[in-house]
Amino acid sequence: MLTKYKIVFLGDQGVGKTSLITRFMYDTFDSHYAATIGIDFLSKTMYLDDKTIRLQLWDTAGQERFRSLIPSYIRDSNVAIVVYDITNRDSFNDVQKWLDYIREERGKDVLIILVGNKSDLKDKVVTSDEAEELSKKLGCNLFIETSSKNGYNVKKLFKKVAKMLPELKNEPTEQETNGNNVQTIDISTDKPEENASSCQC
């Protein structure tokens, strides 16, 4: 049996949503990603303890002209990952706006993850303490800082999300063994990453 969970990535343009997904899916990084147009979709099968789950990753565009599309993709999501750039104060200030989208469509029936991306950069303007405080204030389920460029905490992010997912609430589907956009990872045997900076809220 394979259970599917929908994860929607939200955040301003350029915060690194696509690069986070690409690092997780293919363990690669490209410093010249084109802006996402509308919505992109990828999926990855994960083996977690005695369960097999399919994570459906929905990468949304951050540009204003695509905002009207976003509510329909949030509506049936299990997890909403809100990403900001730790070197961009405006992207952090907009976190509340993205949370409003989520709450309006899903209420409290969704896991909300706050991710501060680009931790490899030195010109940090949003501190971890500040983001952790906002995460608690907004009722997020998890706050973590990541770097798509060097892979810092990216696997840890998805491992934590997978372990937080509700028990088999979705209708099981037949397991697909082939597919261009399907990747498989066994996270039950991975060793924990060291020096991880995360806070469960």
Image: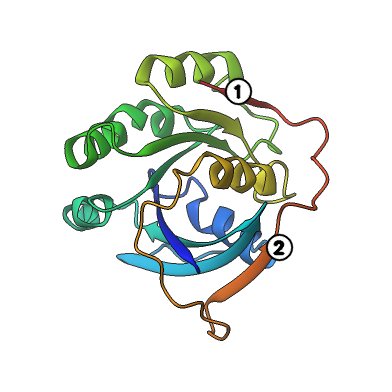
Q: In this view of the protein, which residue sits in the foreground, 27 or 149?
A: 27
x, y percent for residue 54: 50, 64
Question: Which circle, 2 or 1, is nearer the viewer?
Answer: 1
Q: Counting other residues with Cα less than 10 Å from the Cα at mark 2, is it few (<14), some (14-19), or many (20 or more)? A: some
Q: How far apart are marks 2 and 1 (CA)?
A: 24 Å
The answer to whether one can see residue 69 in this image is yes
Q: What residue type is labelled 2?
A: Asp
In the rendered view, would you say 88 is above or below 50? above
* Residue 21 in the figure: left or right of residue 168: right
Left or right of 171? Residue 181 is right
Dot label at residue 169: none
Q: What residue type is labelled 1?
A: Cys
Image point (46%, 62%), residue name: 3
Whether residue 179 sits left or right of residue 65 in the image: it is right
Write down the quadrant of residue 118 in the picture. Answer: top right
| Res 28 seen here | no
Left of 133 or right of it: where is 145? right
Query: Is the residue 72 above or below the residue 111 in the image?
Result: below
Residue that carries the numbered disc 2 in the rendered image:
27
Instruction: Look at the numbered disc 2 and give the secondary structure of its residue.
Output: loop
Q: Residue at x 53, y 64 (%)?
A: 33
Task: From the top left corner, tell me how far across and down residue 105 is, in percent.
Answer: 19, 42
Q: For residue 122, what is the image quadrant?
A: top right
Which quadrant would residue 90 be assigned to in this image?
Answer: top left
Name the residue beneath numbered marker 1. Answer: 199
Answer whether labels 2 and 1 touch (C-beta < 8 Å). Answer: no
Estimate the x, y position of residue 36 in percent, counting from the top left. Answer: 40, 64
Q: In the rendering, at what x and y percent does residue 4 appear?
A: 43, 62
Q: Is residue 130 above or below residue 14?
A: above
Q: Residues within 10 Å of mark 1 (few under 14, many from 20)?
A: some
Q: Earlier in the sequence, mark 2 or mark 1?
A: 2
**Residue at 52% over, 39% down:** 164
